[in-house]
Amino acid sequence: MHLNYLPSFIDIQEDVLNALNKNIPVVALESTIITHGMPFPNNVEMALTVESLVRDRGAVPATIAVIDGRLKIGLTAQELNKLAQVNDALKISRADIAFAISQDKTAGTTVAATMIVARMAGIRVFATGGIGGVHMGAETSFDISADLTELGKTDVVVVAAGAKAILDVPKTLEVLETQGVPVVGYQTDSLPAFWTSGSNLEVPLRLDSAIQISKFLKVRDELQLTAGILVANPIPKSDEIPTAIIRAYIKTAQAEMEAMRISGKLVTPFLLKRIFELSDGESLIANIALVKNNAKLAADIAVQFHK
């Protein structure tokens, strides 16, 4: 969709609009990590740092969110600070993004919703922490994130530290394969496990530079393939939490969640918050480190893609 034909309820931040009009690289950033993933003021500090890292690598950051019914592509510092302090923000995906806009709500965009808006504006590269996926027990609950189906239909490069480790990662990988989504390990043959740099799962494809990833995207465009690309970028080893330790935290948090009968969109925020508590904040430190790492790679890919 051309920028002149975007809906009237969309606001494009000035720097982002200038970049899009002049074909300057832009990196999309999601906002549920701000509204639901981290406490205030850590969320503001993280978001501002990530945006700064994207700029330092030669691209323009575009944090996407809904504020008072306006769909924002790029946030001002004031808007970001406001969003970070909203206590009742919605968490929106493909199913409810129009609801949030039509009802003048404020909301953080998930991976799926961010992909939709990014592609609408012509932004091809997106950095996040980790994607949603198949939840534990999905064979009975059918709890599978819309992120996976969005990756199967929207051609945006998503740079993430794998799927969130609270998920059933093997089943998540299988669904991505079914959806025709290429999963690319960046400089790794092992699928990253969010807080941990590797796992016992092999990554289907491997590329070792932003140039190679950009070339891959360009060839897919020539072939008119519509699925996204998931670039699995490992958290730096110096920042990871050992597998045995994080698994123990996850097991405890999931048992508590089941006892409390928490389900649906409340699952991920509850688990992340509980793991933060169990780890005495170490999970948050690792989460911030991996988001920064993903933002830098996404900016490098966007710069190469625009050459």
Image (cartoon, grey):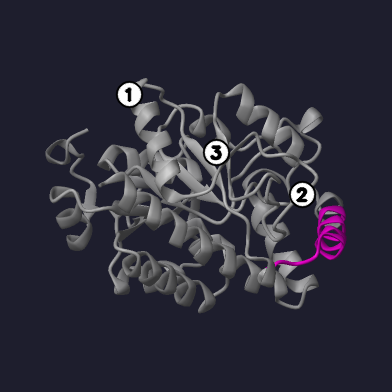
Q: Secondary structure at mark 1?
A: helix
Q: Secondary structure at mark 2?
A: loop
Q: Is residue 136 left or right of residue 76?
A: right
Asked if 149 appears above or below 117 in the picture, the reply is: above
Residue 270: % across, % down: 70, 58
The reply to whether the magenta stretch includes residue 163 is no
Give whichever of discs 1 and 3 has the lower sequence position: 3
Q: Is residue 147 left or right of residue 104?
A: right
Residue 44: % across, % down: 45, 74
Within-10-Å neighbours for mark 1: few <14, some 14–19, many 20+: few
- The one of 108 and 185 positioned closer to us in this rendering: 185
Q: Tell me which residue sits at (46%, 77%) in the image.
A: 45
The quarter of the image holding the N terminus is top left
Main secondary structure type of the part rendered in magenta: helix
Mark 2 vs mark 3, CA separation in Å: 21 Å
Find disc 2 in the rendering and name its residue: 199
Residue 287: % across, % down: 62, 66
Give whichever of discs 2 and 3 has the lower sequence position: 3
Of labels 1 and 3, the one closer to you: 1
The reply to whether residue 29 is visible in this rendering is: no
> Which region of the structure is painted magenta?
240-255
Q: Tell me which residue sits at (45%, 39%) in the image.
A: 96
Q: Secondary structure at mark 3?
A: helix
Q: Is residue 277 left or right of residue 87?
A: right
The reply to whether the magenta stretch includes residue 246 is yes
Within the image, what quadrant is residue 183 found in?
top right
Q: Which mark is residue 147?
A: 3
What residue type is disc 1 on? Answer: Glu
- The one of 105 and 40 positioned closer to us in this rendering: 40
